[in-house]
Structure formats: structure tokens, C-alpha cells
Image (cartoon, rainbow, N blue to C red):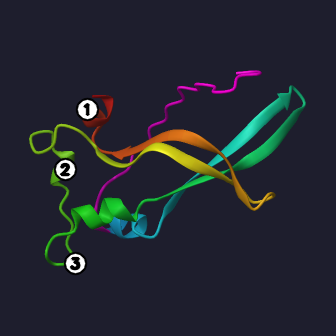
Amino acid sequence: MWQEREPKFQYRSQFPVIMNPDTLSKLEKFTFILEVWDHISPAKEEFVGLVKVPLASFCYSMKTQDDQVFSLNFLADQHCLYPMIVADGYLPIYSPRHGRSVGELALTVALGSSIQINR
């Protein structure tokens, strides 16, 4: 990606998670943080900034009328064809060193079964 004004990384990572009410209550307070680094030379890397995605919206969309009960029906392929998406677009890269946004990163964060995600 050297000298590219708009590099396309096409990086993909999947994390297996056991979904249960305890996991969901932890996700409600969790923020997905992606670090962005610049590989300047083989011996030098420089921290560019952070992209933060709060995951509470996953939990809010699964809560039933009783706030303490979660519905995991979205994980069943017969109920939902596609995964639940919390972020899909350009998100700001915040640089703590500069105290401002220094760019944007196209990012998709989704939750679902491996079949749903791979669709």
C-alpha cells in the first residue's frame, strides 16, 4: 500500500463468541477498538490512531420487553438471513497525539453465525 492515497486493505477477521445472556451483558459495556499503524520501514512503525465502535447496539436490538431477557433468534438462519450489523461505512481514525481525527477507515462490524457472516 506504499504511496497510495486510498489504499484498499481488504483485511477480514472473524472471532468466535459463545452467545449467552452473560456475554451479552458484557458486550453492552464493551467497545471494539481497532488500532491503525503505519509501517514506515522494515524497522519502524508509527501509531496513527484508533477507531472505536461501541457494541451496545447489538444488545439493545436483542432485548425483549423484559430488559433482563435477550433473544438470540437472530443467530438461527431460519429467522435471519444476514448478520446484525453495528457499523458499516467510514469511521473516523482518532489520533490521541494530535487530539483530532486524522482520517477515515471503511469498516464493517457484524454479529451472526458463520453462515450469515459469509453471505
Q: Which mark is residue 115?
A: 1
Q: Residue at x 23, y 38 (%)?
A: 82
Q: Is residue 15 visible?
A: no
Q: In this rendering, is residue 92 above or below 46?
A: below
Give x and y (percent) for residue 10. Answer: 53, 26
Considering only order in the chain, which callout, 3 or 1, is on the residue closer to the N terminus?
3
Q: Which residues are magenta?
A: 1-21
Q: Which mark is residue 67?
A: 3
| Label 1, label 3: how far apart the Cα atoms are | 28 Å
Quadrant including the N terminus: top right
Q: Quadrant of residue 11?
A: top right
Q: Residues within 10 Å of mark 1 (few under 14, many from 20)?
A: few
Q: In this rendering, is residue 91 above or below 56?
A: above
| Label 2, label 3: how far apart the Cα atoms are | 17 Å
Q: Residue at x 17, y 37 (%)?
A: 81
Give the amino acid type for the residue marked by disc 1 in the picture. Answer: Ile
Q: Is residue 50 visible?
A: yes
Does the magenta portion include 17? yes
Q: Residues within 10 Å of mark 2 (few under 14, many from 20)?
A: some
Considering only order in the chain, which callout, 3 or 2, is on the residue closer to the N terminus?
3
Label 1 element class: helix
Quadrant including the C terminus: top left
In the picture of the structure, the residue carrying the numbered disc 2 is 74
Label 3 element class: loop
